[in-house]
Image: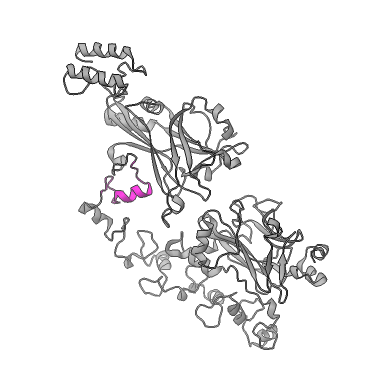
């Protein structure tokens, strides 16, 4: 049978007529790129549209994809692989759905479709279409059906083709009863680019989830192939029913409206016998949010002021205000701003003393600390900026992969920072950070007088922005004096590579090593640990290191590197261009007294007098090589510090 398919060429109609091949009635019936996290739910569906034949797909049969502008396809599912375990048998009219699993694909699928799970979740390493990628069905290694046109996209961000389905869908019309190796857009019902995002700028109120549920139908492709041309079973051809007026065909697809509705190809949410799309086409105002649903069928739970207009449309038209931008008219809400969810207006929380607002922006500190707008690096419950600390995001953050990739380009190269071990092969990477110290110097010079301050403590503040591949392991924070190595996302030529780490940065000093642990899943706030805060102390005045010394010098840039110390680690953090979470941030606390925080050695115990107590305290710390026992500031604690101490002590002052 498969030899017959190959011999008959690529046109599906020819295959069916000349060969009579049952497998030539398997079609691609639906493609979806969902609007939720990672483009999920994302899937391709095939259907056996034969009226009588049961079809088995096996060796030589596959579902494949052309990504972006590529003219060579890659396999999504090989029905002959896995010692035959990948084969699929389809009964007449039965559909089979292959779905994407990365980026919480399984979770997003269940949110949209509940127990109606896909036939198969593809392995995590398999990447599906994101709206401009072409799907093909091959029988006996020959293309028999296709969605899209290979090679026409100019790149991953080109969505100008008429058949694109970014955050949208395309569904085969129910009267298509054979595959077609030449793409014909007229055989498809198109959702339009971003079609599943209609009605909201995000998934506020579950709008996108509802759109996905209402516009896509995995595992159940509607077709009239099994019923021939008498879909309503009244003994007359459908064309006759339409021509005589017995049946209406408002969408001119040559199928009676009642069959469109009964098969699920068209919705009839108000049960008036007319497909919803026809009512909307006749009077577009019936679908004010342009999501393909009649507004009258959406009013329940979406018309809080009961004025007969969807809340989202009230807001969009300006009829209702939505000052807190939560998708609900303010007139329907008892609390406009209640970020901590305690049923009290934020302003009242603050004036009553229940919440603090140290930066006086009428947002409780606890809310800004939770989402990273404010930091609390030392964990004392008070925002760092309100304790006169210097707080600043990195001026540059980078993810550096092995050659030939090198520095990862934007937007991912700036929105995320990945540290991945050598087990990840071409995805192995280290992170690079740069902080401009000029604003820090200006802030502390203003507060304490030029040069009359020193660093007390310094922290690195990170927020997890995890992907599906995240894995725990050890990470090292390293200092380097190499502030010229170009690891910005616009680096040209890209000269820094993962495997060149030791030669690119020969002067590194390990500041600390920590164990990366992916945060807990707390949907919907931080699925997969996303939004989890990490605080790492990278220096203090008691034990000055390279970081503290460079911060005290307050010149140029401070460069830090985050390096994998476990081969399997995959730590992912928000970058400076992340649109949800704060990027890598340095937090520096300073105090008066110049770059030597120990001050005058004569009054060693700082009790206001120079006496024997200072000698006792000095020798106690000198023996332990702690505190301020490096009196002469030469980097070591030895006999020269005793001499230096007594010179100052005998003089009774500095």
Q: In x, y percent, where is residue 75? A: 68, 55
Up-down relation of residue 369 to residue 185 (above or below):
above
The question of residue 360 being in magenta is answered with yes
The question of residue 217 being in magenta is answered with no
> Which quarter of the picture shows residue 334?
bottom left
Image quarter where the C terminus lies is top left
In this picture, which residue range is highlighted in magenta? Answer: 356-376
Report the front residue among 606 and 30.
606
Up-down relation of residue 597 to residue 248 (above or below):
above
Report the front residue among 362 and 56.
56
The residue at 42%/73% (across/down) is: 299
> Which quarter of the picture shows residue 621?
top left
Image quarter where the N terminus lies is bottom right
Q: In x, y percent, where is residue 99? A: 59, 60
User: Magenta region, mostly helix, strand or loop?
Assistant: loop
**In the drawing, does residue 652 fall left or right of residue 414?**
left
Up-down relation of residue 536 to residue 313 (above or below):
above
**In the drawing, does residue 154 fall left or right of residue 563?**
right
Residue 172 visible in rendering: no
Report the front residue among 612 and 463.
612
């Amino acid at each position: 049978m498969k030899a017959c398919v190959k011999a008959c060429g690529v046109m599906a109609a020819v295959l069916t007529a000349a060969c009579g091949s049952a497998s030539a009635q398997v079609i691609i019936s639906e493609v979806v790129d969902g609007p939720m996290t990672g483009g999920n739910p994302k899937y391709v569906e095939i259907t056996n549209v034969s009226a009588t034949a049961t079809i088995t797909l096996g060796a030589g049969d596959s579902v494949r994809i052309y990504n972006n502008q590529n003219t060579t396809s890659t396999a999504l599912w090989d029905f002959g692989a896995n010692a035959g375990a990948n084969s699929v048998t389809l009964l007449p009219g039965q559909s089979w759905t292959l779905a994407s699993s990365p980026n919480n694909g399984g979770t997003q699928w269940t949110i949209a479709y509940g127990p109606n799970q896909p036939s198969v979740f593809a392995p995590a390493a398999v990447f599906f279409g994101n709206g401009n990628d072409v799907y093909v069905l091959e029988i006996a290694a020959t293309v028999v059906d296709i969605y899209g046109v290979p090679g026409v996209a100019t790149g991953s961000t080109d969505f100008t083709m008429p058949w694109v389905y970014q955050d949208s869908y395309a569904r085969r019309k129910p009267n298509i009863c054979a595959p077609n190796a030449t793409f014909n857009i007229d055989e498809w019902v198109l959702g339009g680019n971003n079609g599943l995002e209609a009605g909201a700028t995000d998934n506020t109120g579950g709008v996108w989830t509802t759109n996905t549920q209402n516009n896509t139908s995995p595992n159940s492709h509607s077709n009239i192939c099994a019923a021939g041309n008498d879909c309503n079973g009244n003994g007359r051809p459908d064309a006759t029913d339409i021509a005589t007026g017995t049946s209406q065909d408002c969408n001119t697809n040559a199928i009676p409206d009642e069959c469109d509705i009964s098969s699920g190809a068209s919705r009839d949410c108000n049960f008036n016998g007319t497909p919803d799309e026809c009512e909307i086409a006749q009077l577009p105002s019936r679908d004010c949010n342009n999501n393909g649903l009649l507004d009258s069928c959406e009013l329940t739970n979406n018309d809080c002021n009961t004025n007969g207009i969807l809340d989202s449309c009230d807001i969009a038209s300006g009829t209702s205000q939505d000052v807190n931008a939560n998708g609900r008219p303010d007139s329907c809400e008892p609390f406009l701003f209640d970020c901590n969810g305690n049923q009290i207006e934020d302003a009242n929380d603050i004036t009553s003393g229940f919440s603090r607002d140290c930066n006086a922006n009428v947002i409780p500190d606890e809310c800004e600390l939770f989402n990273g707008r404010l930091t609390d690096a030392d964990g004392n419950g008070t925002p760092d900026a309100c304790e006169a600390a210097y707080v600043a995001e990195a001026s540059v953050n980078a993810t550096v992969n092995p050659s030939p990739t090198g520095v990862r380009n934007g937007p991912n190269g700036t929105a995320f920072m990945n540290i991945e071990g050598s087990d990840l092969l071409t995805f192995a990477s280290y992170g690079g950070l740069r902080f401009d110290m000029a604003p820090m110097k200006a802030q502390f010079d203003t507060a304490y007088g030029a040069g009359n301050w020193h660093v007390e403590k310094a922290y690195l503040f990170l927020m997890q922005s995890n992907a599906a591949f995240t894995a725990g392991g050890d990470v090292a924070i390293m200092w380097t004096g190499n502030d010229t190595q170009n690891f910005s996302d616009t680096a040209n030529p890209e000269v820094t590579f993962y495997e060149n780490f030791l030669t690119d940065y020969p002067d590194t000093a390990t500041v600390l090593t920590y164990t990366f642990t992916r945060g807990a899943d707390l949907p919907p706030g931080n699925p997969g640990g996303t939004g989890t805060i990490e605080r790492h102390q990278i220096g203090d005045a008691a034990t000055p290191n390279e970081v503290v010394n460079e911060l005290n010098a307050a010149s140029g840039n401070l460069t830090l590197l985050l390096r994998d110390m476990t081969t399997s680690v995959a730590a992912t953090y928000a970058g400076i261009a992340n649109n949800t979470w704060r990027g890598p941030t340095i937090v520096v606390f300073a105090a008066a007294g110049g770059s030597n925080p120990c001050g005058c050695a004569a009054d060693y115990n700082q009790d206001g007098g120079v006496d024997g107590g200072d000698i006792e305290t000095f020798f106690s710390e000198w023996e332990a090589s702690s505190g301020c026992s490096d009196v002469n500031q030469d980097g070591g604690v030895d006999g020269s510090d005793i001499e230096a101490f007594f010179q100052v002590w005998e003089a009774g002052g500095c």
